[in-house]
Amino acid sequence: MAQNFLRIECHECGNQQIVYSRASNKVDCMVCGEALLVPTGGKADIKADVVEELAAE
Ligand SMILES: [Zn+2]
C-alpha cells in the first residue's frame, strides 16, 4: 500500500506543511491554528490546498 505524504498549503495564511495522507490525528496549521486535515477513519479529509504529493517507499 502506498504511503503518501502531502505538502499542503493553509487557506488562511499560506503556510505549507507536510502531512501524512492517512493521518489518524487532526493536523492544525503550525502558524494560525486552522484545521488542515481531519481524520475520517480512512483517508483523511484535507481542508487545505494540496501543493504536492510525496510518495514514500
Ligand atoms: Zn495557517
Image (cartoon, rainbow, N blue to C red):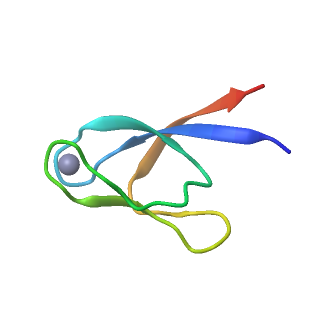
- Where in the figure is residue 41, as x and y percent of width and height? 63, 73
Position of residue 9 relative to residue 34, above or below, is above
Where residue 8 appears, x then y in whole percent? 42, 42
Q: Residue furthest top?
A: 57
Report the side of 3 relative to 21 (left or right).
Answer: right
Q: Residue furthest bottom?
A: 40
Residue 15 image-quadrant placement: top left
Q: Position of residue 27 (x, y in %)?
A: 37, 55
Q: In the rendered image, which quarter contains the N terminus?
A: top right
Q: Horizontal placement of 30 versus 51: left or right?
A: left
Specify the quadrant of the image occupied by residue 24.
bottom right
Q: Residue furthest right?
A: 1
Q: Residue at x 65, y 63 (%)?
A: 43
Q: Is residue 53 above or below residue 32?
A: above
Pick the front one: 39 or 55: 39
Q: How many marks?
A: 0
Which residue is at a point 55% across and 54% down the rendered structure image? 23
Query: For the point 18% across and 55% down, which residue is it?
Result: 33
| Left or right placement of residue 43 versus residue 14 in this view | right
Residue at figure coordinates x 67%, y 40% from the top left? 4
Report whether 37 appears left or right of 12.
right
- Farthest residue to the front: give it: 25
